[in-house]
Amino acid sequence: WREWGDLAYPVAAVWAFFEGETFVLVDAALGAATDMVDPWLLVFSVWLGSFLGDQVWFALGRRYGPAAVRRFPGAQRRLEVALSFIARYGVLFVLTFRFAYGVRNVASAACGMTDMARLRFAALNFVAAGLWAGSFVAGGWFLADWLGPQGVGWLLGTIGIAAIGWIVLRAWRGRAAVGSPAA
C-alpha cells in the first residue's frame, strides 16, 4: 500500500474480480495494523470487483453453458453441486455461495445456465457482493485489532510458510504419483 498508494484499491478490485477472500482479509488486517488502508475504500473496491467478476461468469454460463466450466479441472463436479443447490435453495444460494471457498466462479456460471433472469441475478449478486466485501474487510480489520501489529506479522508469516509448504507437498506428491507403477 505504501508503494502503490491509491492505485492499490483498483488492484484489490481486480483481485476480487477473480477470487480474493485471503487477499481481502490480509489487506484489511494490514490496514488496521498500519493505518495505510481506508476500510471504506477497500470495501467499495472489492465489492465492485467481486460483483463484476460474478457478472462475467454468469454471462459466460449463459452464453456457453457447461462447456464454459468443463475447461477447468475439477469444475464439472462443483458445477453439478452448484446446480443442485440452485434448484434447492435459489435466492439463498445466490446470496451465500461466495462464502463457500472455491465455488464462487462455478456458482455464478451455474446461475447463468439456469432460467434465472439476468436482472434478478445482478440484483442478488450486488447485495451478496456487498455482504461479502463488508464481512471480509471487517473480519480482517477486527482480527488485526485483536492481534496487534506484531501478531499480524506473525500470522502472515505463518500463512506464507504454510502456503509454501502446501505447494511443495503437492508438487512432491505429484512427482511421486507420476513415478509410481500402475496397479
Image: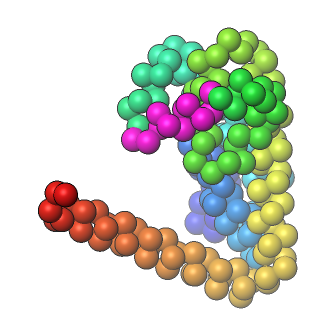
Name which residue lies at 41% across and 30% down. Answer: 70
Name which residue lies at 77% across and 56% down. Answer: 136
Magenta stretch mostly in which secondary structure? helix
Residue 130 occupies quadrant? top right
* 84 left or right of 42 in image: left
The magenta segment? 73-83
| Magenta residue check for 23 | no
| Magenta residue check for 77 | yes
Name which residue lies at 55% across and 31% down. Answer: 80
**Relative to 28, does residue 109 appear above or below in the rendering?**
above
| Quadrant of the rendering where the N terminus is positioned | bottom right
**Relative to 6, does residue 128 appear above or below in the rendering?**
above
**Relative to 122, does residue 143 appear above or below in the rendering?**
below
Can residue 103 be seen by looking at this rendering? yes
Q: Position of residue 50 (x, y in %)?
A: 67, 40
Q: Position of residue 158 (x, y in %)?
A: 58, 81
Residue 182 occupies quadrant? bottom left
The one nearer the camera, 44 or 66, is 66
Residue 166 occupies quadrant? bottom left
